[in-house]
Image: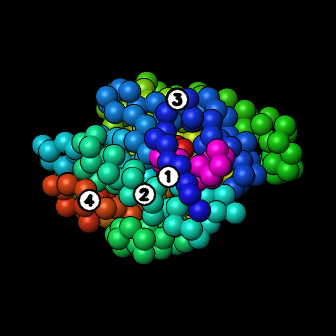
Amino acid sequence: MDYEFQRLSKENIGDVARIHKSVYNREIPLSDLRKKYDTRYLGIEYCCYLAYFKGDPVAFYGLIPVVSHWGTITEISGHLLDFMTVNAHRGRGLFGMLATKSHELARELGITFVWGFGTDVSARALIVKMNFNCDEHVHGYRFFARKRGLDKLFGKTPFLRSLSENRTRRILQQYVTDKLFQGSLYTLPDPVIMRNADYFRYKSFSSAFFIELEEVLFWIKLHPHHGIMIGDIEATSEEQLRKGISAFKELADRHGLGTLVFQTAPETPAEKVIAELADETFLSWKLCYQSISSKFPLEKLKVTWGDLDTF
């Protein structure tokens, strides 16, 4: 089959939504897509490609540039996401073709490495077809708290679920802070995503927000299935982190807000305390990466849930 390839642009970004609808049978707001791929603040945008067959969009390989740093060295990396192919065109090599074209464009634009969160299936495709490294799992931690029986009932209906979520948000809004947030990774000597003011202005398309409990900062987002998602945590010491986690869990239990969930790469500053206090642990995505021209020791790359594109 003959396919046409087009670089993503503001004119064709609606075709990504069409592919998403075909693959997942879910609508994705065009406004959300535009904001997610609007990385003009870095001077680089639309670093990826769509595939068309007879004029119809059939596959997409997404990359979003982000600033990464290792010590005093700064590089632009590409966050891999949203790669998908409609059913009728799977198994025809489109993933590899789109990935190759996107990585070639990334090199031209000064992107030095590509990384992303992979499921077992998608990680296998990255390893086999693109020679990615996917050796390490992100670790997940759950902190159980009571959930109101009424909220459990509300969760079965979208409208009622939104009422429950609005209640949770109103309670947590009492603890909202505008303090500068750097997270748990900023003191590491390992490569991490740079979280500066520009980055958080870009991420404002998300519904995530920051709260403070016991002088500990939490970057959080509400999710109908995951509960209260914690993207990252910032504390001055292990003792303070314990106080903050305990306070958050007690708050959630007192108001019946339900489970708290945090995810992080292993061997990060918060992980030791989190692992001690969590009620349940699990293996989440694989952290996958491929160097284009990076000077970073990418095997040491560290991320948290907040680095996911949808957080």
The x, y position of residue 187, in whole percent, is 23, 47
Residue that appears at 25% across and 56% down: 292
Tell me, for residue 149, which label it has, or none: none
User: Does the rendering let one see residue 223?
Assistant: no
Q: Is residue 14 visible?
A: yes
Q: Which residue is mark 3?
A: 10
- Specify start and end residues of the magenta stretch as a single range: 49-62
**Disc 3 and disc 1 in contact, CB within 8 angstroms:** no
Going from N to C along the chain, the mark reached first, 4 or 1, is: 1
Residue at figure coordinates x 48%, y 70% from the top left: 125
Q: How many marks?
A: 4
Residue under numbered circle 1: 61
Question: Is residue 109 found inside the magenta-colored segment of the image?
Answer: no
Frontmost residue, 302 versus 95: 95
Question: Going 51% across and 67% down the picture, which residue do you hit?
Answer: 93
The residues tagged by marks 1 and 2 sit, at their Cα atoms, a distance apart of: 6 Å
Is disc 3 placed on a helix, strand or loop? Answer: loop
Q: Earlier in the sequence, mark 3 or mark 2?
A: 3
Name the front one of labels 3 and 4: 3
**Mark nearer the N terminus (2 vs 4):** 2
- In whole angstroms, how far apart are the C-alphas of marks 3 and 4? 28 Å
